[in-house]
Image (cartoon, rainbow, N blue to C red):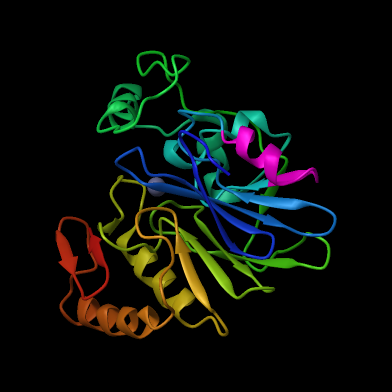
Amino acid sequence: MVDPWFAVQELGSKTFAISEYGHWEKVHSFLLIGEIQAALIDTGLGIVPIKRITDQLTELPIIVLTTHVHADHIGGHGDYDTIYVHGDDADWLIHGIKGLSLEQIRKDMARDITIPVPKSFDPDTYKPYQGYPDKLLSDGDTIDLGNRSLGIYHTPGHSPGHISILDHETGYLFTGDLLYSDTPVYAFYPSTSPEDLVNSLEKIASIQKVSKIYGGHNQLGLEPKIFCEILTAIQYLRENNLVRHGTGVHTFQSFSVHF
Ligand SMILES: [Zn+2]
Ligand SMILES: [Zn+2]
């Protein structure tokens, strides 16, 4: 499939990464297709509607699974009927994030774009999606797509209601902004928590039978051997009392964190 904005990569049978490499954030969303319905993990930046891609990939009903409520992951939410989010991020979805200005969001959305954007995108009027979710997710939930089930892990830290999603079919773990490579993962806003972030990294590193890790930004796909490195990094951070806001960037071999 050729699209001027989205890069679509098949990650395996009925599994697609939909990436926005023309924007500095290099955001990934993922479509997982079962026999009765499909799950769309995040909906991208919203600069270009991601629905024009998912319409071509499946005719089944689509459930949107929100890894977390930041503008770069909920851009296309308004084009879908069924939105799921963890309960602890639901307030941000409904009312927006308190303390994060629209000006800042627009600045981040509009800068460092390397391919042409459609005339319909105007950074001066851009507003992040707001709306009521159809279902609140909890840790341990299972979502059945029809002969394909997804497990929900509550992994707070980057945001209070951040989730990671395990596809039992392929062993792919989708980690949103909890874990990716190339730029630091972070707990930045006052309402986020370095302690939670580290506990969540520890939690996903103990999940069995993960075959590949797919984060929300940058390099597409990480090998599960990164889990060993994460566990060593956590021990180092804890022993040196670095799991606190304001301690800066801590760089390890294949990933870094910014507190
Ligand atoms: Zn985020
Ligand atoms: Zn993000």
**Is 137 or 19 nearer to us in this picture?**
19
State the residue at coordinates (26%, 72%).
254
Instruction: Report whether 28 appears left or right of 144.
Output: left
Residue 240 x %, y % = 15, 78
Instruction: Report whether 101 appears left or right of 243.
Output: right
**Quadrant in the picture for the C terminus:** bottom left
Q: Which residues are magenta?
A: 50-63
**Is 237 or 178 nearer to us in this picture?**
178
Instruction: Report whether 258 appears left or right of 203.
Output: left
Residue 165 x %, y % = 58, 63
- Count of numbered labels shown in the rendering: 0
Residue 230 x %, y % = 33, 78
**Is 247 or 124 nearer to us in this picture?**
124
**Quadrant in the picture for the N terminus:** top right
Q: Is residue 56 magenta?
A: yes
Vertical side of 231 occupied by 185: above or below: above
Residue 14 x %, y % = 69, 60
Vertical side of 182 occupied by 188: above or below: above
Instruction: Report whether 26 appears left or right of 128.
Output: left
State the residue at coordinates (24%, 68%).
243
Q: Which quadrant holds residue 71? A: top left
State the residue at coordinates (51%, 33%).
75
Q: Which quadrant holds residue 255? A: bottom left
Q: Residue furthest front?
A: 2
State the residue at coordinates (29%, 78%).
234
Q: Is residue 251 magenta?
A: no
